[in-house]
Amino acid sequence: MHNGTTHNTKMFKIKTFNAISPKGLARFDTARYQVGPDVTAPEAVLLRSHKLHGEAAPESLLAVARAGAGVNNIPVDDYGKRGIVVFNTPGANANAVKELVLAGMLLSARGILPGIDYARSLGAMNDASAMHALLEKEKSKFAGGELRGKTLGIVGLGAIGSMVADAALALGMTVLGHDPALSIDAAWRLSNAVQRMDSLPALLARSDYVSLHVPAMDATRGLINADMLAHLRPHAVLLNFARESIVDPTAVLAQLAAGKLGRYVCDFPEPGFAAEPKIIAMPHIGASTEESEENCAVMAADQLIDYLEQGHIVNSVNYPALRMDRTAGATRITFANDNVAGVLGHVLSVLAGAGVNVIDMSNRSRDALAYNIIDVATRPNDAVLSAIGAVEHVIRVRVV
């Protein structure tokens, strides 16, 4: 499968979908980038929630950046096979989600929402002393507990999970963590006060609050089902500000009805939730802050610029991360290929046969795909670039 060669031109075209923060759009130098929703034959796409499934990707397309963490609106695997790098912005909205998780815990710990509703219901009262006396009499109905001294179990210890852990520790909570896919970087970020749990059921059984921070994928779909919910204490509060598919809503409703779950706090309302007083459901506002949208857009734009201008890959969901300091005066070639043996050797043979001297190179693989950066002393001619593109298993070649 060959998409041939793609040459670096002075002007890059970026097609946008959705409302992208002006701070993100401002990252693109107008002398080098044409950016907007009406751009044709774009080298890159910058979007939020717009769905690309079923849409024909132009031959010109090199990269897609999602201003946010979830990429289920992008055909990631198909794009990878075509040499289209898909980026996301992990951590850019982490603080916004962390603060909403804290709000969810506080709202579930005490009768804040019903207390506010009760106070509003007294709008017809005109006698201040009578109102104060009534409130003193009724306030015990809205009593609750404190977070300090309680145990929070965090499932998923990435950018958001680790920030929630730090905030909970600062509130005086005991924090347990479970993440079988914990990366080295995430482990370094994590406070050593977080107790690592190898087993999800063990974490559930010990927690007063459980907060979910795992991505939506086949392995996590329905992760919290009837069997897992059975491990929770009857007073426990389950918080889901990750993805709706991680929790089985039918099982949650059944556990609440049976008195085997304290509360469910989530960012994903479902049919039946509104009638259940033990559910606090918010309208998917976890990342909906001005700061978060700006952070995501700036990060997505910077990653596209770094890829288009330097060939670097950071925070891709289908290609390996790869950076290499640029050699002064050198021409940079990048190519994507199927992750099979011998491809890089064939490409280097093509360059050697054409008398093109390699100054520096780096390559990485990720699952079925690989990516390479090669700095050469002289710019190869089109025939050499076409020969590289014709090497078996090479997907896409660029001069950057």
Image: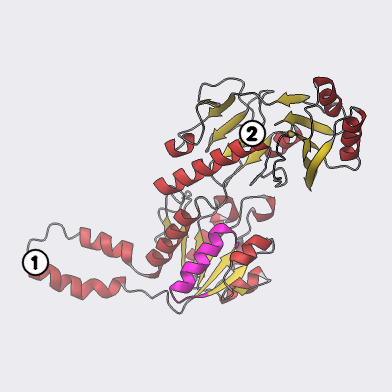
**Residue in the picture at 19% in, 70% down:** 135
The stretch of residues the image draws in magenta is 156-174
Against 333, residue 116 (above or below) is below
Helix, strand or loop under label 2: helix
**Residue in the picture at 56% in, 66% down:** 154
Q: Label 2 neighbourhood size at 10 Å, few (<14), some (14-19), many (20+)? A: many
Image quarter where the N terminus lies is top right
Disc 2 vs disc 1: Cβ atoms closer than 8 Å?
A: no
User: Relative to 158, is 85 on the left or the right?
Assistant: right
**Residue in the picture at 78% in, 45% down:** 362
| Residue at mark 2 to residue at mark 1: CA–CA distance | 66 Å
User: Is residue 172 a member of the stretch shown in magenta?
Assistant: yes
Image quarter where the C terminus lies is top right
Q: Quadrant of residue 329?
A: top right
Label 1 sits on residue: 128
Q: Nearer the viewer, residue 358 or 28?
A: 358
Tag 2: amino acid: Leu
User: Relative to 150, is 199 on the left or the right?
Assistant: right
Evaluate whether residue 205 shows in this view. yes
Please provide percent x and percent y for residue 222: 63, 55
